Image (tube, grey):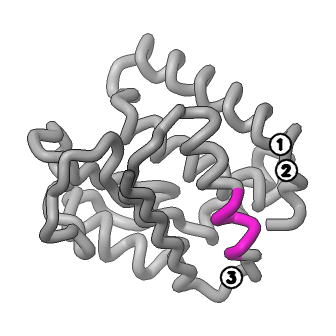
Amino acid sequence: MNRELCLRNRQRVRRINRRQLRKVIATTLHEEFGLVAYQLGVHLVAAPEMTRVNERYLRHAGSTDVITFDHRPGASSVDQESPLACENQSPIMLHGEVFVCVEEAVAQARRFRTTWQAEVLRYILHGLLHLRGYDDTRPAARRAMKRAENRLLRRVARRFALSNL
């Protein structure tokens, strides 16, 4: 079974405990999603890099909170050309990348009166849900995705001290 988790921190806005975050993500993939095989890249980036990715690959102006690239063969996402797309498209259960803008997480955490760590994790979970087939383009689907995201965040927060991220 192939379990690859690549966690990159390319921002300087906040210190990230990569070891702890890796543990949280791996546990979530295995225990919450039931995945035995995956190839996942998680990239923590600053707003300028997120702006470049958003404009180049999604053709949207400015930065955003999270962008997901699904690399599974036949995936319907427009994001097949991620800047870090893998050449080897092996038949595994999850194959993609999640880009998270830490600056956006810090700003949104203030707005929603939560911690920036919880907001970073929320964005990662949001990306994982996209990679598992959730869609947030229609209102009903968006509500279902938000419920799943909230449920996952509560479960992970019960298990891990998010302040340690």
At horizontal 83% and vertical 42% (from top left) the residue drawn is 157
Residue identified by numbered label 2? 160
Q: Is residue 21 magenta?
A: yes
Q: Which of marks 3 and 2 is in front?
A: 2
Residue 92 locus on image (x, y percent) = 28, 46
Looking at the rendered structure, which numbered label has been put on residue 157?
A: 1
Residue identified by numbered label 3? 13
Q: Is residue 64 magenta?
A: no
Q: How far separated are the C-alphas under marks 1 and 3?
A: 22 Å
Does 129 appear above or below 83?
above
Q: Are marks 1 and 2 in contact (CB under 8 Å)?
A: yes
At horizontal 66% and vertical 60% (from top left) the residue drawn is 105
So how many labels did they put on this image?
3
Does 97 appear above or below 140?
below
Does 145 appear above or below 51?
above
Which amino acid is tagged 2?
Phe
Which amino acid is tagged 1?
Ala
Q: What stretch is highlighted in magenta?
A: 18-23
Q: Earlier in the sequence, mark 3 or mark 2?
A: 3
Does 40 appear above or below 91?
below
Q: Based on the displayed image, in which of its 4 quarters is residue 15 positioned?
A: bottom right
Q: Which of marks 1 and 3 is in front?
A: 1
At horizontal 76% and vertical 49% (from top left) the residue drawn is 111
Q: How far separated are the C-alphas under marks 1 and 2?
A: 5 Å
Looking at the rendered structure, which numbered label has been put on residue 14?
A: none
Which amino acid is tagged 3?
Val
106 displayed left or right of 37 = right
Q: How far separated are the C-alphas under marks 3 and 2?
A: 22 Å
